[in-house]
Amino acid sequence: MAQQPVAVVCVGMAGSGKTTFMQRINNYLHINEKKPYVLNLDPAVLNVPFEANIDIRDSINYKEVMKQYNLGPNGGILTSLNLFATKIDQIIGLLEKRAKPDASSTAAPPQHFLVDTPGQIEVFVWSASGSILLESLASSFPTVIAYIIDTPRTHSCSTFMSNMLYACSILYKTKLPMILVFNKTDVQDADFAKEWMTDFEKFQQALQDEESRGVFGGEGFGGGSGYMSSLLNSMSLMLEEFYSHLEMVGVSSMTGDGIDEFFDAVERKADEFNRDYKPELDRRIKERQQEKEGKQGEDLARVMEDMKVGESARPKHKERIGGDEDNDEEEDEDEREADQYENVRPDDDEALQRRYAEELKRQGLQVSEIDQSFARYVAQNRQNVP
Ligand SMILES: Nc1nc2c(ncn2[C@@H]2O[C@H](COP(=O)(O)OP(=O)(O)OP(=O)(O)O)[C@@H](O)[C@H]2O)c(=O)[nH]1
């Protein structure tokens, strides 16, 4: 077991059994005296059948968000997540506190953080706030994605392939280790999926069977055009590499079957996270930080140049004041600009920031992201002005 708690983030299509699975693994850990710490990130869920230590619904009223911002259900979830993401530092702080042994209590720190996510999978995985939440979690704790799959509904070659492509997109989007959890094995066992993922010929065989049964177009049309079948064939070849990066387990959230294997897979993936993913994640965060700082510097310099508030603008003006009389027109122009600048003196922070914001907006730049660096610039600039 890794030393730090492992964050297990459950994602899955609506109806895949994500919530039932969360309930089952939560129950399993309680029975095995490894009490987890649970987070619910689904703002729209009515009843959570397990006790969540942190619940997005405690701080954000999804219905109110929809009403106030005049949004539909998905927009409401997205905006709720965005609002919640602004509190991510506090949440990570809380989790870090929980992860440390508590001297005043005999209870051991949790070994797992279980995270439930909205059923609208794309709202979580493809939103900026989803990325922020996942990345913040992963920069503090080993983080593993559990992708819950409805096994009975994935039994045909085409639904299986659709699900695998979806899993593939989540893997590449989140860049976190992933476990494929084939749920509902009490209804349909997941041996077929294991075979298809490890033996390409078995998948081809199943594909031929389906084709001969007219699954891809109906016998009345001569068994379809063959397009679907050959597409699925090529995709399964393409996905071979992807499969090799995954763990797959078959579970029944109803009966509890396969949950031991799931936690074995979590341990292996947590080790993999620390070994392979963490250094890459740290490198990406550092790179982005540097990029952001560099870009902010460039944007700021460009904007200051435009606004003639940079240091280069002031000496130029000063030199011309006592300069050549023939350049009157140019001087007037410069003086007008200088007056403009005088009206927004560096010590008039608010006005300068306002202009700065307007200018950034005009250039289509994000204002909030660079507010802080601008405040620093203003403070620095004030020191430089005699
Ligand atoms: N037979 C069987 N049914 C299951 C299993 N897990 C979940 N179900 C059923 O599948 C349905 C959907 O389960 P949920 O846990 O609500 O699924 P969900 O993915 O959380 O759905 P959303 O809340 O819409 O995101 C329910 O009727 C569950 O009883 C399982 O292992 N076996």
Image: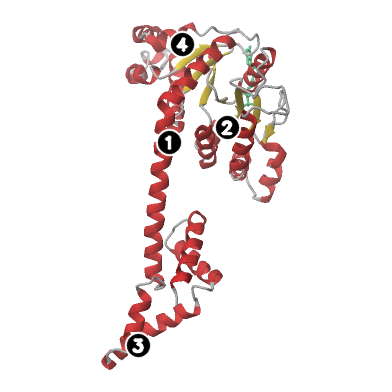
Disc number placed over residue 212 in the picture, else none: none
Q: CA distance from mark 1 to mark 2?
A: 29 Å
Residue type at mark 3 is: Ile
* Structural distance between the alpha carbons of marks 1 and 4: 34 Å
> Dot 4 surroundings within 10 Å: few (below 14), some, or many (20 or more)?
many
Instruction: Give the labeled residue for mark 1.
Output: 282
Residue at 61% from the left image edge and 29% from the top image edge: 99
Residue 325 seen from this side: yes
Tag 3 secondary structure: helix
Which numbered disc flags the more N-terminal residue, 1 or 2? 2
Give the amino acid type for the residue marked by disc 2 in the picture: Gln
Q: Is residue 169 left or right of residue 35?
A: left
Q: Nearer the viewer, residue 23 or 148?
A: 23
* Residue beneath the point at 56% across and 69% down: 350
* Residue 181 in the image, given as x and y percentages of width and height: 53, 16
Q: Earlier in the sequence, mark 1 or mark 4?
A: 4
- Colour basis: secondary structure
> Gap in Å between the C-alphas at discs 4 and 2?
24 Å
Disc 2 target residue: 120
Task: Estimate the spatial distance between the alpha carbons at disc 2 and disc 3, rounded to whole Å.
Answer: 64 Å
Confirm or deny contact between disc 1 and disc 2 (CB under 8 A). no
Label 2 CB-ligand 1 distance < 8 A: yes
Q: Amino acid at mark 1?
A: Asp
Q: Which mark is residue 321?
A: 3
What amino acid type is highlighted by mark number 4? Ala
Cβ–Cβ below 8 Å for labels 4 and 2? no
